[in-house]
Amino acid sequence: MPSLGADMETGTLVEWCIAVGDHVSKGDTVAVVDTDKATIDVEVFETGVVTELLVEPGASVPVGAPLAVIGAADEGESATHAGDAPGTGASHPTPSVPPEQPANTPTTTIVGGPGRHHASVVLSPVVRHLADRLGVDTGRLEGHGPGGRVTRHDVENAARTRVSPRARRMAAASGVDPSRLVGPGSGPGGAVVARDIEATSAAVPHVAEGSAPSGATVQTGKTATTAPSAGGRSTPQQAMARTMERSNREIPHFHVASTIDLEPAMAFLGELNRVRPSGARVLPAAVLLRAVAAASRAVPDVNGWWRDGAPVAAPTVAIGMVVSLRGGGLLTPTLTDPDRCTLDELMDRLRGTVQRARRGSLRSSDIEPATLTVTNLGERGAEVVHGVIQPPQLALVGFGRIVERPWVHGGEVVPRRVVTASLAADHRAVEGHVASRFMSRLERELLDPAALCADRRPGNDDHDPHRPGVEHDGP
Amino acid sequence: MDRDEALRLVGEALSDIAPEAELDAVDPSAELAEELDLDSMDLLELHEALQRLSGVEIADADVASVVTLDRLLDHLTGAGAGDG
């Protein structure tokens, strides 16, 4: 059971996407796991043949428990299906393994229950049942699991339950977990709308506060729902609340902020995007992310974890991005080394990750442990945000709305686009002058967008005009 | 393309991004992103989907001006006229 979040202790196996005897390649989705934050497609780290499944669907196992056994690929049979597995075409960031985190070892012997499926069966019973329930014609489905297997997410995407924000709010208010609503509803395209919730909530029993959310499914009229969660909030929101409480309790936060001239970066993007179709444009968010990564390489004190009473520097830069979900809730998928691919690759990854987060189809590679988190309030956000650090990380970078303000440039006051960046840091590990160094490096990166956005490759640092070196104190 | 068709395409483009959006309820002269709670990523996806569905491109320079539903429909129908 991989660790799919910093606080995760156990996970529930929802279903297997593989059977004994299947070939799997690194990156294939092999199982679907429920954490208290999200349902995640788990990808395998190894290439080989599944020899044993050790955990039954429905079972909860602790992080680190083996789920299945993968043997070496048989000789003579090609095990390199990397190109064959549709849906895994986009390159995955190489999984980064944080030190002393035994739950996330790459030698995944997954523990699973005895395989009941043969390689020739395209649908597992769980997926078939789900398809029946959602009214999805599986004969028309394209499978994205290993060997073209149809997975739960393939079915869900085909059914795509859409829930209106108003319906979500009503669901939450009446004690129904909005993240577990299953349609079709009576809205356009089968969307679940407010009147469906009204019709359903009358029949759904209320659960006493404090009791754990049940997985029972209630079929009422056109809308199936699960039994309500305590207090009317979804399980992921409860998990976030606990994380925020823990952060405030354990981490002595301090905050620094700087307003940064973003005109050069915005002009750079304007030039780039001017001649590109919408599908190829790069958003400021990608550039901000890249700058944070570059700055944290130069000031590594802010990039890591607090472990056993001491700060631990992370071996890589894996940025957790706060993504807001329609109807409420946040997810923080991870982008690894966003400054070590091309800008276009980064934008693709960013788009894909945000889409998967918003559609509830995150993969395990999306939620590897982050080394630093970034929260970006966006175009209609406030001008500055002082965030809450995600334990066990050491820092969190915040960006407010990009605004046009009077600015002194070349000795004159002119309108420039600027952004206020903030750093929340753990004062056990980071001191004021280190935080300031980070902010000034961040500013430096953003003031030279051409260098920041130039193609960089790992190991090519010697050719970088801005060689990422460790910053030293001094004028 | 007429305005009704353009409206239909906007609805279709939005179905993946803001599935619950009821375009009839949107104030056509208000900022669409505000009305539907869309961020920059959503807008990018919307413009791309519209380009795919209608063949009409929204140039980067026009993005700032097609902010309301009315102006978006204007753009889609104006640019689409004569192109079939």
Image: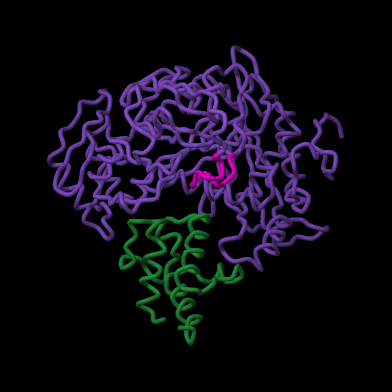
Chain colours: A purple, B green
Q: Position of residue A128 (x, y in %)?
A: 28, 41
Relative placement, left or right, of A400 versus A464 is: left
Q: Is residue B53 above or below residue A286?
A: below
Relative placement, left or right, of A409 versus A187 is: right
Q: Residue furthest top?
A: A308
Q: Position of residue A131 (x, y in %)?
A: 27, 45
Q: Is residue B64 above or below residue A345?
A: below
Q: Mainly helix, strand or loop, the magenta region?
A: loop
Relative placement, left or right, of A236 versus A246 is: left
Q: Position of residue A307 (x, y in %)?
A: 59, 16
- Between A261 and A408, the residue placed more toward the observer is A261
- Between A58 and A5, the residue placed more toward the observer is A58
Residue, x 27% and y 49% (percent of image)? A167
- Quadrant of the rendered image containing residue A178: top left
Position of the N terminus of chain A by quadrant:
top left
- Quadrant of the rendered image containing residue A394: top right
Q: Is residue A389 visible?
A: no
Q: Position of residue A138 (x, y in %)?
A: 30, 49
Q: Is residue A112 above or below residue A170?
A: above
Residue, x 33% and y 54% (percent of image)? A140
- Between A144 and A173, the residue placed more toward the observer is A144
Residue, x 20% and y 26% (percent of image)? A208
Q: Is residue A242 above or below residue A318?
A: above
Magenta span covers which residues?
A81-92
